[in-house]
Image (cartoon, grey):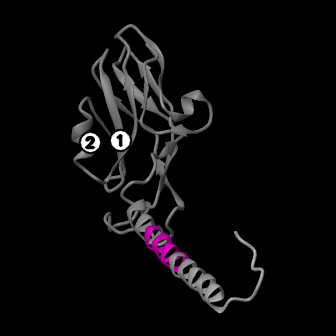
Amino acid sequence: MPRIVKVDLNQVNLQIDKIDNLVKRTGALEQAVGNAGFQIAALDYLHAPPTTNNLVFTWAGGTLTLSWPAGFIQDKNASAQTLVPTKLSSAPSIAHTHAVVAGSKVLSASTWYWVGWDSVHQQLVFNSNAGILHQNFNVLIICQLFTGTAGQAGVAGGGGSRGGVDLSGISYKNF
């Protein structure tokens, strides 16, 4: 930027005009960022990241039974265990915990299953077609797992099967 050698009113006014222009542009950018933040917060519920879970699914091939101990699923921006499933959380970006009771389910051997938590009916749901689970927006996808043969037994998968908590939606093929 050139230095001012002598005071020239035209040059001073030109520089003031440039400063005014920068102030206006900065204000417009601040407003755009504020609007984008509002839009992101509004859409955050719809595009929340995957849930996490600590569930461990165990396959008993002799009885064709998949079982799991009590655990939890944590979601983001959804009302946990509410009677109004479409209600948005009053605390955006806060994880809510859904308690999952222990249970078991008889399934077919050597089959891929998608596992989800139906928050309205408070139960795990299983389907080989993920599209069926996705049709119900009350279902939080937990994982996809492969059941062993009728002669196999052991841990089939789940977020807790790797120790601790893991992202939901992961596929496990332990057999």
Residue 72 in the image, given as x and y percentages of width and height: 51, 46
- Quarter where residue 104 is shown: top left
- Residue reaching furthest to the top: 151
Please name the residue shown 35% across and 69% down the image. Answer: 87
Please name the residue shown 58% across and 28% down the image. Answer: 162
Residue 47 in the image, given as x and y percentages of width and height: 39, 54
Query: As shown in the figure, which amino acid type bears the numbered disc 2?
Result: Leu
- The secondary structure that most of the magenta stretch takes on is helix
Residue 32 forms part of the magenta stretch? yes
Which residues, given as a range, are shown in magenta? 26-36
Q: Do the residues labelled 1 and 2 touch (CB within 8 Å)?
A: yes
Horizontal side, residue 167 vs residue 82: left or right: right
* Mark number, residue 133: 2
Residue 169 in the image, given as x and y percentages of width and height: 42, 36
Query: As shown in the figure, which amino acid type bears the numbered disc 1?
Result: Gly
Q: In this view, does 131 lie above or below 61?
A: below
Please name the residue shown 31% across and 54% down the image. Answer: 138
> Dot 1: what SS?
strand
Query: Looking at the image, which is closer to me, 135 or 72?
Result: 135
- Give the quarter of the figure containing the N terminus: bottom right
Residue 130 in the image, given as x and y percentages of width and height: 27, 35
Horizontal side, residue 63 vs residue 93: left or right: left
Find disc 1 in the rendering and name its residue: 116
Label 1 neighbour load within 10 Å: few <14, some 14-19, many 20+: many
Please name the residue shown 46% across and 33% down the image. Answer: 68
